[in-house]
Amino acid sequence: MKTRSYKHRELRFLLVSTTVVTFFLLGLVQGISAAVTPPDGIIGLFERTDGGYFTLIDEESHNMVTNSARVLDIGDAYIDSNNHRYEVTRIDGDIIYVKNTGEVPKVTREAETSSKSSRFAWLSGLLAQTSPTPRRIALYCTHSDESYVPTSGTPSKEWGDVYEVTRALENEFGKRGFQVDRSTVNHNPHDSHAYVRSRRTATQLLRRRPLVIIDVHRDAVPEHLYRTEIGGTELARLQLVVGRQNQNRDANLQFAQLLKEEADKQYPGLVKGIFDAKGNYNQDLAPRSILVEFGTHETSLSMAEKAADLISDVLPAAAGVTVPMSSSGSRSTLWILGLVILAAIALVVLNAMGWEGVRNFFGREFASAFGVRRKKRLSGSKGPKDSSEDDQDRSDMS
């Protein structure tokens, strides 16, 4: 009987062990498969490489909306400079028909919905300006060959001009107190697997937990769509691209809209528009992942660099953070914060005691501190004293 019982226990143990190992191996295989299999929308030619471009036509007015070198699909959308949204309904060769679905509503942060929360946000902003914690921006280039014809004489070369745009962004964000992780990894060739190769770069950059990660590109449409003048300076406009095929699409589209809204406030005309298009663009890796096109192949590198200066002003505000201040600015902010705290304390005391109570309290304290009553008694200027007070005064004077 004991031998049979022992064999039963041994059999149960073997069965449980085998089950556990089997599930572990299945999980391991699934994990490896998930790591090896790229997500949807990461492989493909999302831009034309034949030098041509598409024309987006409003199906009702028959007016041209914009041109696009980006390959679009039914359901993709474009938000123009006036914040009108156009959705792709039909494609006929190089003509893409779109439907105007109206003006997109403005994006507002939850912290701005009430005056109370706004006051706390303002106080948090003051505290953030004195914080030594650095804010990070990550930069890389999936299409490493993209260049500007007026600058390099070619739209494509091994180390494209887009790397110089990332250098300009690094400098401009650095001037504003940000730490910048700029990748110079080359992801050539410019083919259907470019985003697969750049995915490793983006993953490494995200390990340092940047506030925003930007994939820097340039467009390939006629220059008049991107050439503009702001504050008397000629520069290239920007275009934002959000991938529809990833779980962060809504968060990234909201961030792109905030970025455009802030740019419209500070530098109207800087942002040409937003494409909400098919593709992943590695934006599934993190929210606030954005693809930014700095001009087109027919604008110059210097025009893109000037745009980098302006977007460095816009992006922190869109991300809801304050630009870190210098040490002198931080000291000024601390003074302001100290005055705010003192004013708050004074307000609490006033509400608790009232003006009469505050006046009586400070009257008693000042009288006690400066010996006002004692001086009155010594001078004898007011009221009779009893004999004990006279004796005490004379003994004090002696």
Image: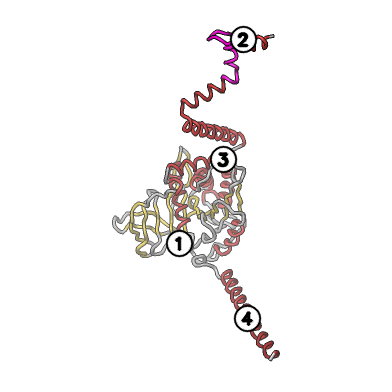
Q: Name the residue under label 1.
A: 244
What main secondary structure does the magenta stretch of the protein show? helix
Q: Do the residues labelled 2 and 1 touch (CB within 8 Å)?
A: no
Q: How far apart are marks 2 and 4 (CA)?
A: 103 Å
- Local crowd size for mark 2, using a 10 Å CA cut-off: few (<14), some (14–19), many (≥20): some
Label 4 or label 3, whichever comes before in sequence order = 4
- Local crowd size for mark 1, using a 10 Å CA cut-off: few (<14), some (14–19), many (≥20): many
Give the amino acid at mark 2.
Answer: Asp
Q: Distance between the residues labelled 4 and 1?
A: 44 Å
Q: Distance between the residues labelled 4 and 3?
A: 58 Å
Q: How far apart are marks 1 and 3 (CA)?
A: 35 Å
Give the amino acid at mark 3.
Answer: Gln
In the rendered image, residue 270 lying in the magenta stretch gets the answer no
| Residue drawn at the location 37% of the way across and 64% of the way down | 91
Q: How far apart are marks 3 and 2 (CA)?
A: 63 Å
Q: Mark 2 points at which residue?
A: 390
